[in-house]
Amino acid sequence: MRIGFIGLGIMGEAMCENIVKKSGKEVLVYDINEEQVKKLVDIGAKAAASNKEIGEKCDLIISMVPKSQHVKGVYSELLPVLTPGKILMDMSTIDPSVSRELSVLVKEKGCLMLDAPVVKSKPAAIKGELGIYVGGDKGAYERARPVLSCMGNNLIHMGDNGLGLVMKICHNMLVAQIQNGVNETIALAEKSGLSFDDVVTAISYGGGQNFYLDGKKNAIKNEDFTTAFSVENMNKDINIAINLSKELEIKLPGAENARRVYEGAMAMGLDKEDFSAAIKVIRDR
């Protein structure tokens, strides 16, 4: 099996590096940023000249790009050159309906598509400890599983095409609301004159203790919002969740509130900062 990897950004670079190091397979890589490609070539990958070349030469084709329109752009170059039997695995977080539409086009070429979005952030990607939610053909998932295992240690097949993405969107909708709850709690406590450190300690004594307070407390205290997962990406995901809720005719007032906060963070120019920086919106209000 020859593997192709398209998209070597914040997450993709580390994910691909683990495939190169662990899979024992030949890996072709492509990204519009030539410096990112060179980093992977330096550890044993081979550079492809285009998405088209990866589509022609690889048996398992992985993409990890930012948004639905980017995935559509990649697949517009892959689809014309596909030959039967290939597996395409998009690990981007995009609109599930877009992924389902592409899966139909892939199937028409005699190939199979998996949606396989990831959870956790860059440190887990570096360690190969991502969670990965997979939608699509179960047999294709089993064939791709050894490669998925290079990138993550928690893999779950969620069902048909698009359901991996639905699970990812549900997960990130919850994360957005938890972080917003953390930020509002800290803002209220600060305004009341409580010590930041005392607040964190006191919460740890009760049922309010949570991963996002424990993981982001230093960032918030020191106002060091170095990006692990950006405001821009969280804003994208919470908007996908709201769009999905409208399609399914279910009202999600908590998610709507979180969307207003993250859209506020975008308006403040915080798009490239870590999503916990949305506390600035709460403090500003």
Image (spheres, rainbow, N blue to C red):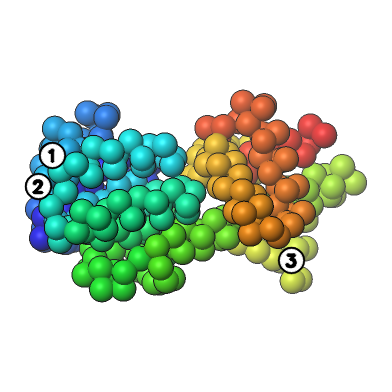
Q: Residue at x 58, y 60 (%)?
A: 170
Q: Which residue was labeled with disc 3?
A: 208
Which is more N-terminal, label 3 or label 2?
Answer: 2
Which quarter shows the N terminus? bottom left
| Residue at the front extreme, as displayed | 108
Residue 57 vs residue 132, the one in the foreground: 57
Q: Which residue was labeled with disc 1?
A: 53
Q: Is residue 123 visible?
A: no
Q: Amino acid at mark 1?
A: Glu
Per the image, label 1 sits on a secondary structure element best described as: helix
Q: Which residue was labeled with disc 2?
A: 57
Q: Is residue 150 toward the left or the right of residue 136 in the image?
A: left
Q: Are marks 3 and 1 in contact (CB under 8 Å)?
A: no
Residue 237 vs residue 71, the one in the foreground: 71
How many other residues sit within 10 Å of disc 1, few (<14), some (14-19) or many (≥20)?
Answer: some
Mark 3 vs mark 1: in front: 1
Which quarter shows the C terminus? top right
* Callout count: 3
Q: Quadrant of residue 74?
A: top left
